[in-house]
Amino acid sequence: MRKIRPDIIYLSSSMQGHGGPHASYIGYGPNACALSGFSEVSGWPDRMPAAPHGAYTDYICPRFNATALIAALDYRRRTGKGQWIEQSQFETSLHFFSPPIMDYLINERILSRQGNRLPHAAPHGVFPCKGDDRWVAIAVFTDEEWQAFCHAIGNPEWAKKAESTP
């Protein structure tokens, strides 16, 4: 193609890239999602991994492709040259794991499934209520939110005790 049209911009996207030992593997979004690790860290700690809804890598990779195409168009405008952009959905998706990878390398902590909990929010989760199939979602991130939450629930004794604890 380059001989016929030297300014062509060609983008190819596959599960694990054009070259390497896994290049010939058939790529499906759920496979890339599992291979990238999203399935392993999704779900409840006491259950089997639960893949995120849909093929998550299919949702995030086009944004990277669009950015690469814009850069290639700018490059072509400045130089008159085209490019071949080759994208691996597996590699593109791994950037979401930068914090847990750093946490492992520095602190030797392994990211695990946490259900609907967040380590930097408390209380945080979906909790059962009185009655059949009744639930409440609570997310408290700051001291101000904690105060507002306590006020909203009528400041029960256990909330007052927590407020006085250093």
Image (tube, rainbow, N blue to C red):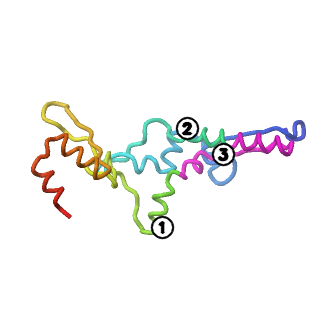
The residue where tag 1 is placed is 105
Mark 1 and mark 3: Cα distance apart in space: 26 Å
Direction from residue 120 to residue 17 in the image, left or right: right
Direction from residue 123 to residue 156 in the image, left or right: left
Mark 3 and mark 2: Cα distance apart in space: 12 Å
Q: Are there few (<14), some (14-19), or many (20+) residues within 10 Å of tag 3?
A: many
Q: Viewer-proximal residue, 84 or 128?
A: 128
| Magenta stretch: dominant secondary structure | helix
Which residue ends up furthest to the top in the rendered image? 132
Which residue ends up furthest to the right in the rendered image? 3
Picture disc at residue 87: 3
Mark 3 in CB contact with mark 2 (< 8 angstroms)? no
Direction from residue 119 to residue 99 in the image, left or right: right
Mark 2 in CB contact with mark 1 (< 8 angstroms)? no
Magenta part of the protein: which range?
68-95
> Magenta stretch: residue 94 in it?
yes
Residue type at tag 3: Gln
What residue sits 53% from the left and 42% below the top? 57
Q: Are there few (<14), some (14-19), or many (20+) residues within 10 Å of tag 2?
A: some
